[in-house]
Amino acid sequence: MKRNNMKQGLVWVLASLVFVACKEDTKMAPCESDFFYDGSPFRQGEVGTILPDYNSGEDIPGVFSASEGLVLKDNLTGEIDLAASAPGAYSIRKTMIGNTTCGNRIAMTYLSILPPPSVLNRADNGDGWGWAGEGFVDQEDKMEGLAAIKTKVNGAGNLLLLQHHLSEPLNTQVSKALGELHVWFYVSDPSQFDPMAEIGQFELTSSGGPDKNEFTWPIILNNMNINAGWNELVLKFKDASITGGDPDLAAINFFRLYMFTKGDSDSPVTIGLDDLRILAAE
């Protein structure tokens, strides 16, 4: 009987030790590594590399991996090389190592990379520009770079026009669903135009001129909240009207803006453009 009691006691002690060991294991660092990349979507050209941020589990070591097209600069820290990566949507995994309670547990997050802006024209000089009215390059009143392109008229019902022929077709790197034309648009005196009527258009084409393979956006000052001075406009491709078929977004080569003053306009008026860029929507 004594021998059996000793065996039972030994079993109880061993079970207790195993229980305590399991209990101690549960006190180890948890296997949750909640990481993310703050600022997604990222636009190429604005940031070079990025490191992950953490809500928890930053100290848990792991190995990072990502879907094809995303370049990891360091697979132990999760640093991403945005410039070397391709635009797109990605999943990033962290496989935890070095903690016996984790096994190969995986944490995951997502991010998106947008292509860099495609520069339609910086409006820093008059190369490739034409106009109706008295066109000029304004090196003083500008929004970016060296100058802005402007034109002015004086009189009722006059046409103001600024147009640009690109020396080489521009591959915008965007789709119709996500593409946007960003422009700085200057109007010296909006009261010289009918605020409720369609007084002109913005146009973007791949045909080398107007009215074919063209996106158009109507100019209605009240709808666009145009004020005197510089106005930042975002014209979405998906909202554009189409003339003569969709433009080839890999070969944009012509831009035009035109406006008509009111029939009773009695003061000089100037319009202008600066920093024309095409971006993918965030």
Image: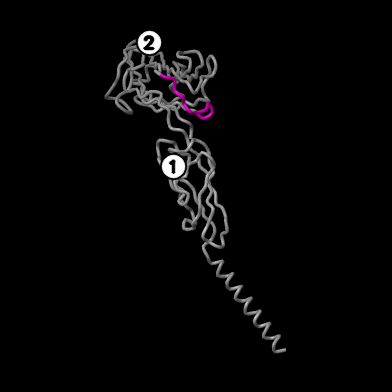
Other-residue count near label 1 (Cα within 10 Å), few / some / many at <14 / 14–19 / ≥20: some
Instruction: Identify the residue at horizontal 51%, vertical 38% (top origin).
Output: 69
The x and y percentages for residue 154 are 32, 12
Quadrant in the picture for residue 229 = top left
SS for dot 2: loop
Q: Secondary structure at mark 1?
A: strand
- Residue type for callout 1: Asp
Which span of residues is magenta-colored?
168-178
Q: Nearer the viewer, residue 262 or 176?
A: 176
Q: Is residue 138 one of those drawn in magenta?
A: no
**Residue for point 44% across, 45% down:** 73
Name the outermost residue toward the left.
140
Residue 220, image x and y in percent?
Answer: 45, 20
- Whole-percent x, y for residue 166 in the image: 40, 18
Of callouts 1 and 2, the N-terminal one: 1
* Residue 68, image x, y percentages: 53, 40
Q: Which residue is mark 2?
A: 158
Q: Amino acid at mark 2?
A: Asn
Question: Magenta region, mostly helix, strand or loop?
Answer: loop
Q: Is residue 177 magenta?
A: yes
Question: Which residue lies most toward the right here?
Answer: 1
Q: Is residue 175 above or below residue 204?
A: below
Report, in whole angstroms, how far the alpha carbon at label 1 lies from the one at label 2.
Answer: 52 Å
Say the numbered circle drawn on residue 101.
none
Q: Is residue 279 above or below residue 129?
A: below
Give the left or right position of residue 266, taking residue 278 as reference.
left
Q: Is residue 255 above or below residue 47?
A: above
Name the quadrant of the N terminus.
Answer: bottom right
x 51%, y 22%: residue: 240
Q: Are marks 1 and 2 in contact (CB under 8 Å)?
A: no
Q: Which residue is mark 1?
A: 81
Q: Specify few, some or many for label 2: CA neighbours under 10 Å numbering under 14, 14-19, or 20 or more.
A: some
